[in-house]
Structures are given as structure tokens and as C-alpha cells.
Image (cartoon, rainbow, N blue to C red):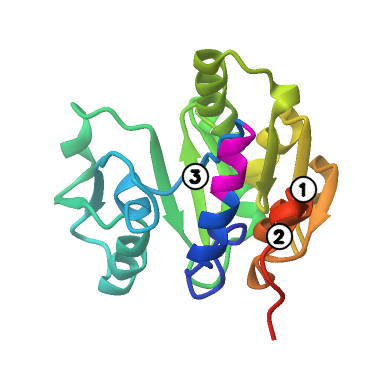
Amino acid sequence: MDGTFLRPDSTFDRPRLAMLRRRMREDGVRFVVASGNQEAQLLGFFEGEEDGAFILATQPADIRDCLAFYLPKYETVGTASDLTVRRIDKGSIVQREGVDPALVEELVSALEGVMVPVASGHDCVDVIMPGRHKVFGLGVLLEHSGLAWEQVAAFGDSANDVEMLEAAGTGVAMAGSSELALAAADAVAPDNAEDGVLAVLEHWFADQAAPARP
């Protein structure tokens, strides 16, 4: 979503996407949101199911405000020990001054594979369960639908998109993506500020391209 599909102000051209989705459905093509963002946040854009998140009460107010955008449905807990009986799939670390690559390397060493750190952009490092990346979720969907990775086109911009871009039959990185994402991709789209995903989809489904804009 962020840095790939959404513009910098977290909007997108809804009529333009609606037109493209109609055309895609006619050809039996599915449009799938593969995001590490909380489902409750995605409800503002697409239909879905809600999940929950936890934020420590000791976090500064500006950190809570930052996280609340991506985790609009959350519960405040006193200490990390309050989560010992909860199932946790992912944690997020915020560095307000920007993600330091050295932090990711230190976490890789310290966690020893128990959890996997990956930079997700927007001053965040996600720490996920091993194998619980976007390829895992999409793989479940593909198996259920009887489809193969060769039939998938995927868009991404960050390190947490690398596995997906490599697995897809066509991996498309956004202009300005991380070096890891660009290296994993087969093609490059205009950046998210230029509605790059929609522009590529219009090229692929050219017979119903959006009308020219002034």
C-alpha cells in the first residue's frame, strides 16, 4: 500500500481503479492487496476483516500517534509480559529519524532466526514470524484458487516485498524503490505519486484505458 499503491497523501484514484477492476474481472484477473498493514486500516480502502494490535502504554504519545495510523484498532497494554498468552505474528519498531540499516543487521544477529526483521519503509522495521511474509499469504490464496506463481504480477517498493517480487511471474518495482526491491523486480513502474500501479494496469488493459487528464 504505502509507497506502492497509495499516493504520498494516502489517497488513490478510486474511479480509475473501479474501471480497471471491472475490466480485470471480465478477464478473470483478481486484484489482491498484499499488505503488512493492519486489516482495520485497510477497511478504509477495501473490504476486509478486522484484526487487533497492541501498543505499550509506556510509548511516547508521538509514537502512538504514528502507529495508530497503521494500527487503528489497538489495545494498550502495560508491559510486554502481558502478551505472553497472545498469538503475535508481527512486531513493529519505529525509528523517528529514519531506519538505520545497522539496526536490521543487529536484529538479524540477535534474533538468530526466531523472528525475522525487515525494513518496511516509513521509519519502521517489522519483526515477523519466519516464513510469514507476503509470499506465504499469497501462496495460500494461489493454492485455494488453483493458480501458479507464473500467473502472478506483483508490485512493491520495499525490502518486505522482495520475496513476492522474486516469486511472481512478473515483479514490478516502483520508481524510487529500495535497492533490494529493484534488484528483485523484472520491471519498474512510475512512482506512487504518479499512480504508477494504475498506469501499468492501464497499459496491460489498454482497450479500457482511463481518459486523458488535462
Q: How many marks?
A: 3
Q: Is residue 31 positioned above or below 213 on the image?
A: above
How far apart marks 3 and 2 lie (CA) works out to 26 Å
Residue named by callout 1? 204
Amino acid, disc 3: Ser
Query: Which residue does the image show at 48% across and 40% down from the upper left?
Result: 127
Circle 1 Cα neighbour tier, 10 Å, few/some/many (<14 / 14–19 / ≥20) = few
Circle 3 Cα neighbour tier, 10 Å, few/some/many (<14 / 14–19 / ≥20) = some
- Which is nearer the N-term, disc 1 or disc 2? 1
Query: Which residue does the image show at 42% across and 49% down from the upper left?
Result: 37
Query: Which residue does the image show at 85% across and 42% down from the upper left?
Result: 186
Q: Which mark is residue 35?
A: 3
Amino acid, disc 1: Trp
Q: Which mark is residue 209?
A: 2
The magenta region covers 21-27
The image quadrant of residue 134 is: top right
Q: Which mark is residue 47?
A: none
Is residue 26 rendered magenta in the image?
Answer: yes
